[in-house]
Image (cartoon, helix red, strand yellow):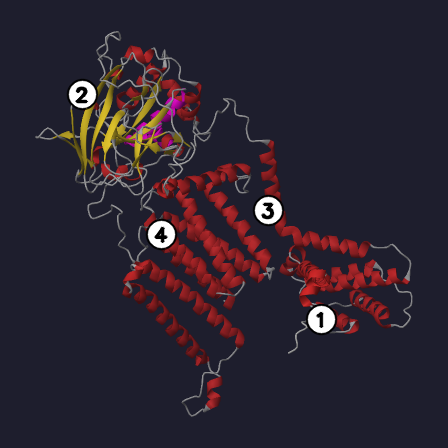
Amino acid sequence: MSGRDRLALSAFAATMMAAGALLPLVESSKWVLHATFLLAVQCGVGALARRLRLARILTVCLQVFVTLLTLTVAFAREYALFGVLPGPQAGRRLAELLTMGADDVSRYATPAPATDGIRLMLIGGVLVIGLAVDVLAVTCRAAAPAGLPLLALYSVAAGLSDGGAGWLWFLLAACGYLLLLLAEGRDRLSRWGRVFGGVSRTSGGPAAGLAGSGSTQAPVRTGRRIGAVALGIALVVPAALPALDGGLLDGAGGGTGKGSGGGTISAVNPLVSLQNNLNQPENREVMSYRTNSGSPQDFYLRILSLDQFNGGEWRPSTRRLQDVPDRLPQPAGLGGEIAVTEIRTNITASRSYQQTYLPLPYPASEVDVQGSWRYEPEGRTLVGDDGQTTRGARYEVSSLVVEPTGAQLAAAAPPPADMAREYTRVPSSLPDVVEETAERVTAGSADDYERAVKLQDWFASQGGFRYDTTVTSGTGTAAIERFLKDKEGFCVHFSFTMAAMARTLGIPARVAVGFTPGTVQADGSVSVGLRDAHAWPELYFEGVGWTRFEPTPSRGSAPAYTLPDAPSQDPSDPALPTDGASAAPTAVPSASESCPAQMRRQGECGASAAPGAVDSADPGTPAGTVTLWVLGALVALLLPLVPMLWRIRVRGRRLGSSGGRTPADAAARVMAAWREITDTAWDHGIPPDESQTPRKAAARVVRLGGLDGSAAAAVHRVAGAVEQVLYAPEPDAVSVPTGDVRDVRAALWISAGRWGRLRATFAPRSAVRVVWAASERRTEAGRRWSDRVGRSRWTARLRRPSRQQG
């Protein structure tokens, strides 16, 4: 194994050792195996390119191209051209996964689930860092700067793991960097030859220090000592300086809510730990409340609503926030003919419960809470501002109990057009089985209300589904399809799937996340524990508003208006709401100009990210976009072929010139033929030597290229013509037949091996003349600019000598 191969292997090992700091960020560690394999492919391609002695830029371009191919095959194979090439659809798929991964990172607490988006970010990040390390340490032979990308990899892990990735991971990354430096040192020493190790202590005297296999041990030991001292300083100094808060190794982050108890829903998106909460061995209390509700079984505490389904997950829209009004506006879509009763509730959150969103009964009408909170009108939620959480919060809520009848829901008018467009949108990646199943289950229904009830009953009792909290969680289209096939899951699967199916039927739907009513205590209060965490679908009916349904079996309670024996209530004699319960809706004001940074990071500020109107007939991908993607793919495929194409063009120009009959034209043709011969020899591994005369250069090409016969004679004929052009006082009329150049090229092709032929064709060494020419043009342009500035009037004034006498 050569020194450069050992250096490449060390770069690979250093990258994977630094990538170990990312392991605590994700629940599953299988992604490391995928990253290791893809990084090995990337490094192997680089090692092969360096063995072929490709130019550095070609080596890097080839590694980038292979990395893009492997990521496409791993994450977007079904969208790729021929299953491999990254076409327009594959590019869009990778972009979607990156967007979803960024959203997951911003809202998931660690360890986060290994979603496709997070896996792509992890594996892609490791490959990018690995490429940077390989380019710096191996291709450019500068291992010391390669520590910067390794440090960046560890720093990202430390920043996302709430206070540091742990001293063990830092030590592992540091050892990987030291291993890389040691490999580079050995490579440099091997290229220098034997090292003087000092005066020998043996009888051999000073001369003995110049030879021997063990003479390199002294520098190696010195490098190890320096590395150990540097690593010790990095470990000890941060711990010794309190002002540094432990430095990179401080693992005791503050305020993460992770403590020894664990299990609290502490992420921005509570779905992150919902399954963990349902599987807790102890149903630890997160809040308690007292209410005067007449139907406690329907008293759900709602945290937030998820109203966007992008194919990978359900997530809340980004909408404008405003100050909390004294009385919240009338719920959207609620008409005056629906029976409404207002109740009051006092809620106390546990000290161990930290949540950015304030749990509220839906729809709340008044909220009296201390602290810094903001109001999001569309979802009717309160969001903590500037680090505000629910930890130990005590608050009082007035809320409405909306009691529609089945007849009122069945007679609901169609939803507004903008409401239908936004809340019935489904991703193009949604499997056809979802819509087909929804139509089959709801066949024969007379209205949307009957369809919704049939969907709820099919999931809850008639479809053969089984409630199981140990099933692997998922929020994307693949999880929905798997759930419909296996028919086992928990509330996330039931609510997400019913909401998606309702949307395919044209019923506006979203998913609410929060808690079921809890357990009544002896003192009359109600305790809500970890196992009461829940998700349920909300469907919109005009005149009623967002309406709760309960498809999850053995969880919560089905609303009275979905039961077949629900008592009918005379709509002409509804229960009287309290004063102010039917206040007119207020306009949503614009977001405050001083929206805090935390809200911006959480995506809760700025204009609504809800998409605008979409025509029901999908026009498909615009022709311009397809053209750009095709052109991009062609550029990526043709980029490695640029040196070959340039060489073909130059050869054709040199050998195809036949114009002009003057001695100067003949001399130009002779020099072009000679340059073509020297460049062809260079492409086949015989670099030019400008210090030699044409005759000696020709003999060198014949000797190193193994030429004989007509090819050797052709080289000497061209060299003789060059000497006539360069040195004769009055050169004779000389001409070089293009057949001589072709004979020399054919002979060099035959004498070269297979790899030499491939290298000469696809990566000709003489293509470096393009770089040289560009450098010369840049230098010439700089010289002209300097001359122009030097001749300007203002520069002349500045350079005018002073009249003062020294």
First along the sequence among labels 1 and 4: 4
**Distance (Cα) linking label 1 and label 4:** 55 Å
- Crowd around label 1: few <14 · some 14–19 · many ≥20 (10 Å): few
* Residue type pointed to by label 1: Asp
In the picture of the structure, the residue carrying the numbered disc 1 is 689
448 above or below 183? above
Q: What's the magenta bit mostly, secondary-structure-wise?
A: helix
Residue contact at pointers 1 and 4, CB within 8 angstroms: no
Q: Secondary structure at mark 2?
A: loop
**Residue visible at 30% across and 13% down?**
336
Image side of residue 596 versus residue 698, left or right = left
Residue 680 vs residue 724, the one in the foreground: 724
Specify the segment rendered in magenta: 481-505
Q: Secondary structure at mark 3?
A: helix
Q: Quadrant of residue 330?
A: top left
Residue 495 belongs to the span the image colors magenta: yes
Q: Quadrant of residue 707?
A: bottom right
